[in-house]
Amino acid sequence: MTRQSRALLRSALPKSVLVSALALGVIAPYAQAAPASATAAVPAGIGPWTAPKELAGVTAVVDLKSARDGSVAGLFTRDGETVLSVLPAGSDTWGEATPAPAARLQRTDDGAVSLLWWEGAADGGTRTLKMSRLAPDGGDFTPAETVTTGTLAQDQVHSRTQVTTLAANAEGHQAVAWMDAEHRLTVVERPGPDGAWSTPKTLDQLPDPIVRDDNIYDYVLHDMRVAVDPAGTVGVLWGGNSRYTGDGVDPDPSAYQWHYKYLEKPAGADAAWTAPRDVPQLGEQPGQVTLAAHPQGGFHLLENGSYARKAAGAAEWGPAEPVGIGSQSHVPAELHTAANGDVTAVGMQGSGAPGVATRLASRGSWGETRKLASNVVSDSVSSVATAGAVVVTYTQKRFELGRTVRQDFVAQTVEGGDVAKPRTLNALTKDTGSTGRVAADAKGRPVAVWTQAAADGGTRAAYTATTGARALPRWHDYADSARGDVVGLSPSDSMRLYTGDTANPTETFSVSPWKDTTRVVPFGDFDGDRCNDMVVRLPEGEVRLYTPVCGGGLPAPESEHKRLARDWSKYDTLFASGDQTGDGRPDLLARDKATGDVYRYTHDGAGGFEARVKIRSAWTGYKKVVGAGDLNGDGLGDVLALDDAGVLWRYDGLSTGKLKDRVRVFKDWGSTYTDVIGAGDVDGDGKQDLLSRDTSDRVWLNAGDGDGTFQNRVAFGDASYWKGWTSLG
């Protein structure tokens, strides 16, 4: 699902449809905007991951950043040394590697990627700060230029803290902040990439150590953050806490103090820096704070699960908003902000559990925090904003019999607060560990680079992969597995997705909270993003259309949706078989509980459905009616119906939107079945199959023959697994 897909969900039904639809209980979408036209272009969602390619000679991925044009800069370890290499925009070949010892990659808001390092004496004397830039429009890194000279702190710095940091706005106004040998905050800036750097300005200093009778508590730097907003205002947030450095055994907790200060220099040549001041929104014991410029002006920050915004020109920070996303052990959370003001936070929910949350500008508040995974290795999370989505990667431990058998490099797509099923990118080789980073290329696709090494540190290789073009979706395929998937509900109030993807150890993906009496109808591609969507009926009768994240996403109840009806309790069955009319768009079918009449709601091609049309009468003798997909290969959706005598009938679709006369498929069939679904091609042979669950929770597969008939049933999975599902869709 893309941002334009979400815009379609906010659009109203065309007026000509709305008049007749209201008579049936259909109302306008819950977030109304201008109607979408039938020719509205909805870009395809992020495609499936392609097969990995090996990167010769690389033994570790240090960092990965992308320039505005899609060129990707990588810091790698090769032959024991840190090297820099560039993947030019539009190319699939990495450039020649050059040595880059003690350097850091930093991506700024002008779209450039910069390499910063200090040269000269490392004994506290004067040194020279150097910088080389990969311009926003790509090319090669520029020759090294001198930023400034000065000293650099050698002590009272946490070992994982970045002492020198760079920021720039979209116009190229740059600022660099660092802590010098006297533990002072120092800043230089320039108005653009070709301007002159200012004289270093000292702005603050870590407090003197706290001395007790037996112990000394030195302040240690933990955070150095700088940002430049669109107007050119520079904001700096820095700080640390006092730390016990003595050799006693009874440290004094009262000596643990925190020094975190925010300073700001408004835009303008004659503007002056503000005095250092506290930020109450950080709480009493801050650490690993995220500070970033907001694209609509001003700044925003995230610390220990709380978010705050300082609007452009505002004197104070706004109130703290709970988010539920914190930093990694030694790496701050990330804030990805779209041009419309939507903010996605990527970080940790708890130990070993990365999560995401999105603040939609249209709502002005944070949505539910979504947990991505468990058993994730500390500081392994990385993320990147791609075309319309955020892609998150991390390293996850896999266990067998209580033992770690593998550490996998995993990718997940996040969009509008919803998440897709995890995708493991490395080979599933036991006793190996994989870790890496992700950036974005010129096409807005994620580019991942990772290493996979034997657990004993022996064999080690590096790989890269991106996502490919998205083809038209197969019926019931949500997770890009090229097979039909199963969607349903569980007794634990979650929606579940089962996929038969043997290359992915995450077999079941779930999202909460959904009442277990909710009913899910797998639907085709409603919005044109080449990803299957779904219709959901809530226990109270309300019917909604959701367009999940491509690649195996499931919605939560509060996810963006189109309300199809306030109460469709009069229909005992909602189902879909794909395209019923031959126009290439999926349609919705419904059976009236009282009369047994079957109605078709035709996709109108403009973000809604036409008024209902009756296609069959008095189907009261069927205890189950099933949307089966295209069983005979003619491109039209077919329907299966099971009568009280245990006869299964097939109704082939007609291009008129109606159904042919019935044909018997099975007799003496299905008397113990509680669920029967047309599940798509679950066995991978290209033909539509049938899944059924009996009263003992055993699931059976009747493989399709491709002509509307089926083979005899075989067991599909273990009953102990399917017992955890209250319904199959």
Image: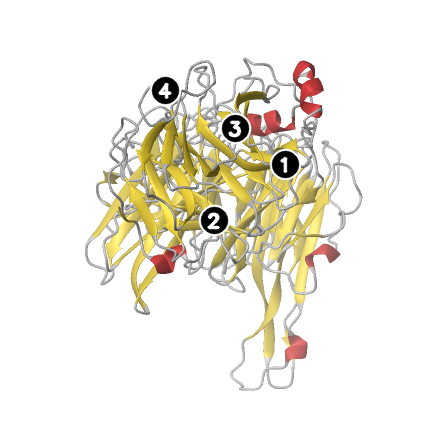
At label 4, the amino acid type is Gly
Q: Which residue is mark 3?
A: 589
Earlier sequence position, callout 4 versus callout 2: 4
Give the x, y percent position of residue 697: 39, 56
Which residue is at a point 32% across and 48% down the rendered structure image? 700
- The residue that label 4 is drawn on is 635
Separation of marks 4 and 1 at Cα, in angstroms: 30 Å
Say whether marks 1 and 2 touch (CB < 8 Å).
no
Q: Identify the secondary structure beneath mark 2.
A: strand
What count of labels does the image hold? 4
Place of residue 85 in the rendered image (x, y in percent of width and height, measured from the top left): 33, 36
Q: Nearer the viewer, mark 4 or mark 1?
A: 1
In the rendered image, which quarter is residue 418 located in? top right
Q: Amino acid at mark 2?
A: Ser
**In the rendered structure, which disc, 1 or 2, sits on the residue that comes first in sequence?**
1
Q: Nearer the viewer, mark 4 or mark 3?
A: 3
Q: Position of residue 374 (x, y in %)?
A: 45, 59
Report the residue marked by disc 2.
Answer: 727
Amino acid type shown at disc 1? Lys
Q: Secondary structure at mark 4?
A: loop
Q: Which secondary structure, mark 3?
A: strand
Position of the C terminus, as image quadrant, is: top left
Report which residue position mark 1 lands on: 570
Q: Amino acid at mark 3?
A: Leu
**In front: 406, or 95?**
406
